[in-house]
Image (spheres, coloured by chain):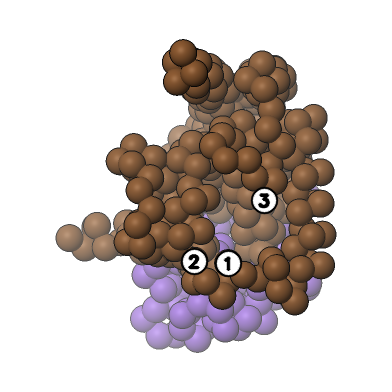
Amino acid sequence: MTDQFSEAPFEYRGEPVLGLRQIDRMNGAAKGTAFRAFKRVRHALQEDREFFVVDIDAPGDAKSARLMGDMKEAGALYPASRVAVLITAEAYARMQGVARLPAR
Amino acid sequence: MTTLVEWLRPWEPSAPVFIACALAVVIYAAGMMRGARPGFWPALSYFAGVGLIYAVTQTHYDYYSQFLFAAHRLQHLILHHLGPFLIALSMPTAVLAAGLPAAVRRLPDGGLRPFFRALRVVYRILQQPFIAGFLFVGLIYFWLTPEIHFDAMLSIDLYWFMNWTMVVDGLLFWWLIFERGDRGITPRLSPGRRILVLALIMPPQIALGAYITFSGQNLFEIYDVCGRAFPIDPMLDQQIGGLITWIPAAMMSVAAAIIVLAFRLERDDEKA
């Protein structure tokens, strides 16, 4: 995560995670590119292990609320998103397999 | 120029859609080159129908369909209503038959006869007016059930399955409505029955469109996951989508009824 294309990951439940906007930005890709890659591999991913879904306006706990606040402040979420999809390294690796996304 | 290329590049390339559209154009063109004379307006209607289906699935428009509910509804209006409507209106059977290689035309009478016989039975069942109308409206309701819509928009395979079902069902329905010329295997309904079917499919579409338009609740949350294609209030997006489901879709029934009546009058004139 140190090269010029990398984005600083956030931490969620002890895992380093990236938001979809960060992945798009990291790749200089159009909005939706990371989501498209995510949709292609979602069937092979395990929720709450390889990716997490957090309601931005109603996060389940204080930690998640703080994370959503930090991500908003860092511009890591698309303004129109109401749900944050948090991608772990494992999920990102799978997404790379179906889209031309650089290694993290 | 770059913008045009970007617009023409599919957001989610689909080989089956590309091949189906290419074959539809090539076989029809081959039929014309082999002497079939569909006439200017039928040919235009056919190519416009195929072109519209291609445009909303294999260009950058598809991006907006996946990130904006209103664009999605317009996409389905074309896949289920306008595109198949134009194709069926052109009654392309004779031209397509002329364009097919002779070996393919002989298939139903060859070793695959039992398969084609079974296919014909299924086709005749699906083309019973009540079943055809029920399927036409039922599919719209089915794919707009919020939970099902969420899953369909979140899975690439289900997304394409949804789009294919809309096109195939649209073709079946409008084929039944506009069927004319030499008798084939499609049941031939009287103009009155065709108009009755068209009238019966209108109220459920109007009700669904009105429900979506006036719902105070954000029904389709999938568009909130990555955010919409551009900043637009989710409720406004939903209202526009509801209006597209409501008004143009219902108007297609009116337009079809007028066309059915025009065909009837034309036939009466020919007899007189």
Q: Which of A99 and B139 is in front in this view?
A: B139
Colour of chain B as rendered:
brown
Q: Distance between the residues labelled 1 and 2?
A: 6 Å
Q: Earlier in the sequence, mark 3 or mark 1?
A: 1
| Quarter of the image that includes the N terminus of chain B | bottom left
Marks 3 and 1, how far apart in space? 25 Å
Chain under label 2?
B
- Residue type beneath disc 1: Arg
Q: Check disc 3 and report the residue beneath it.
A: B165
Task: Identify the disc placed on residue B100.
Answer: 2
The image position of residue B59, as x and y in percent, is 40, 57
Callout 2 amino acid: Leu
Q: Nearer the viewer, residue A40 or B246?
A: B246
| Residue B244 in the image, given as x and y percentages of width and height | 53, 28
Q: Which chain carries label 3?
A: B
Q: Name the residue under label 1.
A: B105
Residue sitting nearer the eye, A80 or B268: B268
Is disc 3 surrounded by few (<14), some (14 to 19) or many (20+) residues within 10 Å? some
Q: Nearer the viewer, mark 3 or mark 1?
A: 1
Q: Tell which circle, 3 or 2, labels the residue nearer the N-terminal end.
A: 2
Image coords of residue B210 (percent x, y): 64, 19
Q: Do labels 3 and 2 share a chain?
A: yes
Drawn colour of chain A?
Answer: purple
Q: What element carries label 1?
A: helix
- Which chain is indicated by disc 1? B
Labels 3 and 2 touching (C-beta < 8 A): no
CB atoms of marks 1 and 2 within 8 Å: yes
- Residue at the spot 63% in from the left edge and 49% down from the top edge: B168
Q: How many marks?
A: 3
